[in-house]
Amino acid sequence: MGLIWSLIVGGIIGAIAGAITKKGGSMGLVANIVAGLLGSSIGQWLLGSWGPSLAGMAIIPSVIGAVILVVVVSKLKSK
């Protein structure tokens, strides 16, 4: 059940990051989950684990990390 919960929270974090960066329309479900999970790792690595947490992911640093990830990947894809 823990893995499923992590995938759901990762997908939500990725969807939020896509909405913030206006790239959500071009991202699918799997891309949202990957962006959320990787972004969570990046955000918590850069900013630490503070604020509210779900499924072991600190929400605010995770969303910030996912936004960074989506922006970087979209810049690399546009070149």
Image: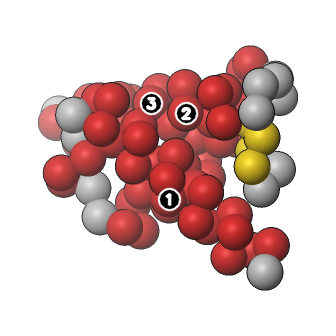
- Name the disc covering residue 67, or none: 3
Q: Left or right of 55: which side holds 30?
A: left
User: In the rendering, at what x and y percent does residue 6 appear?
Assistant: 69, 63
Label 2 amino acid?
Val
Image quadrant where residue 45 sits: top right
In screen coordinates, is 4 left or right of 69?
A: right
- Quarter of the figure with residue 32: bottom left
Image location of residue 24, percent across then percent down: 26, 47
Report the residue that reaches farthest toward the top. 47
| Residue to which mark 1 is pinned | 11
On the question of residue 20 being in view, the answer is yes
Neighbours of disc 2 within 10 Å: few (<14), some (14-19), many (20+): many
Answer with mark 3 or mark 1, whichever residue precedes in sequence.
1
Q: Give above or below for 63 relative to 47.
A: below
User: Is residue 76 left or right of 42 when viewed as pictured?
Assistant: left
Residue closer to the observer: 52 or 36: 52
Mark drawn on residue 63: 2
Residue 1 position within the rendered picture, expressed as x and y whole percent measured from the top left: 78, 81
- Marks 2 and 1, the one that precedes in the sequence: 1
Q: Nearer the viewer, mark 2 or mark 3?
A: 2
* Residue visible at 69% across and 69% down in the picture: 5
- Amino acid type of disc 1? Gly
Q: Are marks 2 and 3 in contact (CB under 8 Å)?
A: yes
Instruction: Tell me the residue at 61%/57% (across/down).
Output: 9
